[in-house]
Image: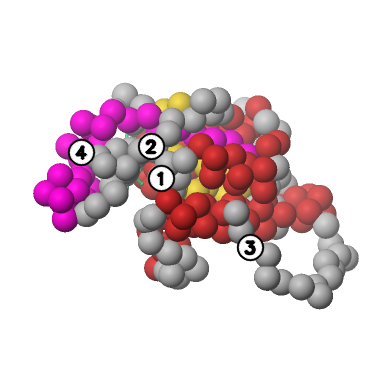
Amino acid sequence: MTKIKATNITWHEGHVGREERETLLKQKGAVIWTTGLSGSGKSTIAYTLEHALVQRGHLSYVLDGDNIRHGLNKNLGFSAEDREENIRRLGEVGKLFVDAGIITITAFISPYSKDRDIAREAVGTDSFFEIFCDTPLDVCEERDPKGLYKKARAGEIKGFTGIDDPYEAPSNPEMVIDTSKVSPQDAAVLLCEMLEKAGKIPQLAD
Ligand code: ADP
């Protein structure tokens, strides 16, 4: 539970609202929240989708777990408590980006259902799309893009998700993608279709 330390503060309404920004951008703000094991393809899908959306003329931005831990969250580690605070802050950042009208794609392992639910609540469920990168552990481990599984198996990293720390699979995600079967390009197409159906971006003219 986050301790509230800020007192004597007042919410200030601006003169420009979310709707006006969305009209300007010809899109609606959304968070595409990818979740899954390390190496399951979250970042690859996120950057492929960002590229596809920008090519279609949409403002999109990736919040990548490792990159955020270089700055905003560099004071947080990988204990359950720090992982919770990591995701809480990222949900709040997602909320701000959605209010700005941006199609935001996040790539965080986010292993605990409760924390993802908190992010969903912060953003608003109509604008939150949970995408489960359900790639088998052995495929993720074989890929090992950052050499982390090797280190975790050797005991050099403790509390590694999927090895000696739990991953709680989403029970009701908006989409499940197994990247051992679906290419990043095909995943981006599926996600664009999902955004069209939800009215977040207009359909492409024939
Ligand atoms: P994560 O962000 O989940 O840790 P990454 O996207 O950083 O995962 O790494 C996934 C690795 O798997 C990359 O090296 C990527 O090139 C590779 N890969 C192979 N096939 C796919 C696919 N279909 N979708 C996504 N990544 C894939």
Q: Which residue is mark 3?
A: 3
In the displayed structure, 143 sits above or below 67; it is above
Q: Which label's residue is closer to the chain start, 1 or 4?
A: 1
Instruction: Answer left or right for 51 relative to 38.
Output: right
Where is residue 7 drawn, in percent x and y? 76, 73
Residue 177 in view here: yes
Q: Which label's residue is closer to the chain start, 1 or 2?
A: 1
Ligand 1 within 8 A of label 1's CB? Answer: yes
Q: Residue at x 46, y 36 (%)?
A: 188
Q: Secondary structure at mark 1?
A: loop
Q: Secondary structure at mark 4?
A: helix
Q: CA distance from mark 1 to mark 2?
A: 8 Å
The quarter of the rendered structure image containing the N terminus is bottom right
Q: Amino acid at mark 2?
A: Tyr
Pair 1/2: label in front: 2
Q: Which label's residue is closer to the chain start, 4 or 2?
A: 4
Quarter where residue 205 is shown: top right
Q: Amino acid at mark 4?
A: Glu
Q: Residue 109 versus residue 56: which sits nearer the camera?
A: 109
Q: Which residue is mark 2?
A: 167
In the displayed structure, 2 sits above or below 185; it is below
Q: Amino acid at mark 1?
A: Ile
Q: Residue 165 versus residue 44: which sits nearer the camera?
A: 165
Q: CA distance from mark 1 to mark 4?
A: 15 Å
User: What segment carries the magenta color?
Assistant: 128-156
Residue 45 in view here: no
Where is residue 60 drawn, in percent x and y? 56, 52
Q: Residue at x 21, y 31 (%)?
A: 138
